[in-house]
Structure formats: structure tokens, C-alpha cells
């Protein structure tokens, strides 16, 4: 059966549907974070190496960003999105039923590769939105990504305590199936003029963007640094919380992640400020908050309330910078939003992979205090980098 062509305008309700879809899709690469200790036991992986589970999905996510997201500039995004989601369902079932660590890693690799549908949706939303509200729309859709990342930890923890870690991926496959059917029926038609480039030329043009667009270079490095920090917190946090004196259940650890939903406020508000020409002001304040967040995070031994405060500050800061980065980039080359999104998000994926591996290794070497020192150090580097590049004209293109 062929879907009917949809020509409805891009409304806020459709933007929220995009946000829900992004949340479900991106959750697939974060389910493993609160399950690291369970996976380590199930497959005989040491704590010092268990971060590889996250690194595999993030690196494959980076590959998907380069190979798949630019296709949105070449072919209609509607079938591209539906196809990615349908294949994701199959990959999730493979992970949920994997009998060996090799099949687990293979399934997670494909899950990471196809989770880039979130970025195709973000680029799609930005192209459908009116210019005057583009930042707000990007903020709404990105807020779904934030909630999905955090909801992933809560759902994963609850389901693991209830029915084991495999149930997490099987339930996700079911949810993704339902959303695929919904999108099949109501996803708006892609009216953007497509590129005349061949696929190899399209991929080469992604690489050219790094050389041609100074704004992409600046905002990409910022993205890499903030997501190193973001991944350091969320990958390693499960390790001290699952050990004495806390010995929290997976459900409790996942519930702590809900504190980060405050980051959605940062995402939506940052988009509005970017529309108003206040992108640099937003970036500076957010990076200061990012650095300050590691102070209460380092006091986890005194009270979990300090941990919650640190989570709120860190997520708020990261999402504010992330949405501001995207809002600025989407103004410079409207005809290449897919490629710009891919180019930018590769920095994100690399940062997430580095943070996952570095945090578990640091925790094995110096405990939670070592993770906090490392996270604070990377936050300082991010703030200094922004200050150094502040006077660069390219970093103000969206403000003129």
C-alpha cells in the first residue's frame, strides 16, 4: 500500500511528533549506559573496558552521520526516515536476543548507525519551519532528543530490574515499530529542492564544508568538547552509584537521570534567544554553568542532592550550547542542511565516544573524584576555546 501524499503545513503538533520520534530513536544509543554493570557481568567484560559498549555505538553513529544524513539533501527525506526506523527495529531485536558479545556489539553498531535518523529529522524540521521561528522549532525537536536520552536511562533501569537487560531493547523495538507506522501515515512531504550531486560528490562536499565554513569549525569543536563532558558524566555515573555505600538499583539510577529534563528548558529557550540574535550571550553563560556543574557533582559523597543539582546544571548548559550551535549553522547554507547537520554532529559523536571511554578508564584509575577533575578540565578548555574564538567574524554570522 502506498502512502498518500501529505501537503499539510508544518505545525507545532508535527514538531512535537518529530520530538517524540527523535527521543525514541536517540534513546537506543543510551540504553546501555545504566546497564554497564549488568552487561559486564553477562558477557564477562571488565569495568575498565565496559565503556567500549558505548564507544561502539557512538563511533558507528559518527559513521552514520557521514554516510546517511547527507542523503537528505539528495533524496526525499520521507522514505529515508521511514526506512531507517524500520531497519532500526530489526537491529534492536538482534541486540535483545544476542547470545554472544560479538553479536551484541554487531547489533549495537547497526543501532548506532541508524540512530542518525534523529539528525535527519532535525534538518527536516529546520527546512520546513518558517525562518522567524526556526530556532524555536529546532529547540522543540532537540528537546525531544534530550528527554529521549534521559528517559532511556529511566526506562532501561526499570525494565532491567523487572525483566532483565534484554527486555530494554525488545521494548524499544516495539515502540519504534509503532512510531514508524505513525510516521508512515502523517509525515509531511519534503518539498526542498534536492542536490544534483552524485552520492560520492555529496560525501566529498561534506568534507569540503570543514574547510570552507569557519563557523562549522568553531561550533563543531565546541560540540565535541561539551559532549565529551556530557558523556563522561552519564557513562561513569552508574559505576559509583551501583557500588557501596549507595548500591542503588537500576531503577533508582535511571530515575536520577530524569533530573536532567531541565535541559529541555535550556534547549527551547536557547533556540528563542538565537532567533533574537543572542547566540553568543547564551553560549558564554552556558559554558560557565558547565564548568560550575562539576562542583556539586564532586560532592556526591555528601548527598545525592548535590548530584541532582550538578546533573541539572550540566544538562542545561550542554543543551543550550547544542541548540545555539545548530541554530547558527542552519542560517548559512539552507540548501545543505543535511550535510551541515552531518558535519556538525560528527563532532558530537566523536566527543561522546571519547568521553565514554575516558570516563570509565579514569574511574578505574582514580575513582569518581578523578572523573570530576577530568570533566572540569575539559569544561575549562571549552570555555577558553569560546573566548579565544569570540572575536572571529565567522562566529557572529547568525547575529548580523
Image: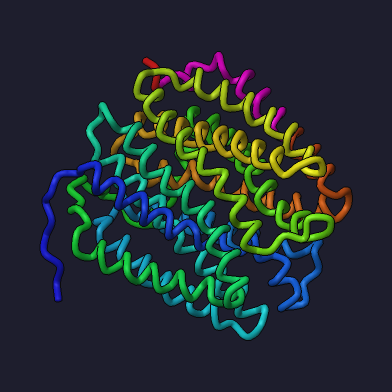
Q: Quadrant of the C terminus?
A: top left
**Number of numbered callouts drawn:** 0
Tell me the quarter of the picture where residue 35 sits: bottom right
- Residue 114 on image: x %, y %: 45, 63
Q: Hey, which residue is sitting farthest right in the picture?
A: 365
Q: Residue furthest bottom?
A: 99
At 34% from the left edge and 33% from the top edge, which residue is drawn?
136
Residue 223 appears in the figure = yes
Q: Nearer the viewer, residue 367 or 126?
A: 367
Seen in the picture, residue 42 relative to 52 is either above or below; the reply is below
- Please give left or right for residue 62 compared with residue 99 in the image: left
Residue 140, magenta (yes or no): no
Q: Tell me which segment is drawn in magenta.
A: 378-397
Vertical comparison of 312 with 280: above or below: below
Please provide percent x and percent y for residue 174. 40, 73
Q: How is the image coloured?
A: rainbow
In the displayed structure, 12 sits above or below 269; it is below
Give the residue displayed 61% in from the left and 76% down from the top. Answer: 164
Query: How far from the left and from the top, in percent, is residue 341?
Result: 42, 44
Residue 388 lies in the magenta stretch: yes
Residue 29 is drawn in which quadrant? bottom right
Along the horizontal axis of the image, is 221 left or right of 337?
right
Image check: 111 left or right of 101? Answer: left
Q: What residue sits 58% from the left and 33% below the top?
A: 222
Q: Residue 316 location, x and y as percent? A: 54, 35
Relative to residue 138, is residue 188 drawn left or right?
Answer: left
Is the magenta region chiefly helix, strand or loop?
A: helix
Q: Is residue 275 above or below residue 249?
A: above
Answer yes or no: is residue 200 visible: no
> Which of the image's four quarters has the N terminus?
bottom left
User: Which residue lies at the image location 65% right of the left edge and 43% below the top edge?
Assistant: 228
- Please tell me which residue lies in front, 191 or 283: 283
Amino acid at each position: 500500500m502506498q502512502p498518500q501524499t501529505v501537503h499539510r503545513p508544518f505545525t507545532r503538533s508535527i514538531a512535537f511528533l518529530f520530538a517524540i520520534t527523535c527521543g525514541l530513536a536517540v534513546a537506543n544509543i543510551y540504553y546501555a549506559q545504566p546497564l554497564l554493570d549488568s552487561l559486564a557481568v553477562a558477557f564477562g567484560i571488565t569495568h575498565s573496558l565496559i565503556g567500549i559498549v558505548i564507544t561502539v555505538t557512538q563511533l558507528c553513529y559518527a559513521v552514520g552521520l557521514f554516510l546517511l544524513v547527507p542523503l537528505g539533501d539528495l533524496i526525499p527525506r520521507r522514505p529515508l526516515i521511514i526506512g531507517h526506523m524500520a531497519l532500526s527495529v530489526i537491529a534492536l531485536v538482534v541486540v535483545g536476543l544476542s547470545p554472544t558479545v560479538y553479536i551484541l556489539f554487531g547489533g549495537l553498531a547497526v543501532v548506532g548507525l541508524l540512530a542518525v535518523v534523529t539528525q535527519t529529522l532535525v534538518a527536516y524540521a529546520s527546512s520546513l519551519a518558517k525562518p522567524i521561528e526556526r530556532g524555536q522549532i529546532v529547540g522543540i525537536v532537540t528537546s525531544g532528543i534530550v528527554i529521549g536520552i534521559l528517559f532511556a536511562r529511566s526506562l532501561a533501569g526499570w525494565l532491567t530490574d523487572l525483566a532483565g537487560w534484554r527486555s530494554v531493547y525488545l521494548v524499544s523495538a516495539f515502540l519504534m515499530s509503532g512510531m514508524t507506522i505513525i510516521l508512515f501515515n502523517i509525515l509531511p512531504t519534503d518539498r526542498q529542492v534536492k542536490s544534483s550531486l552524485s552520492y560520492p560528490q555529496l560525501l566529498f562536499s561534506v568534507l569540503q564544508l570543514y574547510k570552507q565554513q569557519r563557523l562549522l569549525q568553531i561550533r563543531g569543536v565546541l560540540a565535541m568538547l561539551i559532549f565529551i563532558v556530557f558523556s563522561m558524566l552519564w557513562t561513569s555515573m552508574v559505576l559509583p552509584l551501583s557500588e557501596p555505600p549507595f548500591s542503588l538499583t537500576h531503577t533508582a539510577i535511571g530515575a536520577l537521570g530524569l533530573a536532567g529534563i531541565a535541559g529541555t528548558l535550556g534547549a527551547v529557550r536557547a533556540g528563542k534567544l538565537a532567533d533574537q540574535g543572542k547566540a553568543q550571550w547564551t553560549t558564554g553563560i552556558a559554558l560557565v554553568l558547565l564548568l560550575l556543574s562539576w562542583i556539586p557533582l564532586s560532592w556526591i559523597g555528601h548527598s545525592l542532592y548535590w548530584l541532582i543539582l550538578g546533573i541539572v546544571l550540566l544538562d542545561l548548559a550542554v543543551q543550550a550550547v547544542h541548540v545555539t550551535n545548530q541554530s547558527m549553522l542552519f542560517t548559512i547554507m539552507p540548501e545543505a542542511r543535511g550535510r551541515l547537520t552531518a558535519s556538525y554532529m560528527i563532532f558530537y559523536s566523536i566527543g561522546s565516544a571519547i568521553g565514554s571511554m575516558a570516563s570509565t578508564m579514569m574511574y578505574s584509575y582514580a575513582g569518581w573524584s578523578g572523573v570530576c577533575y577530568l570533566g572540569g578540565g575539559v569544561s575549562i578548555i571549552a570555555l577558553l576555546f569560546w573566548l579565544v574564538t569570540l572575536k572571529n567574524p565567522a562566529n557572529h554570522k547568525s547575529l548580523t
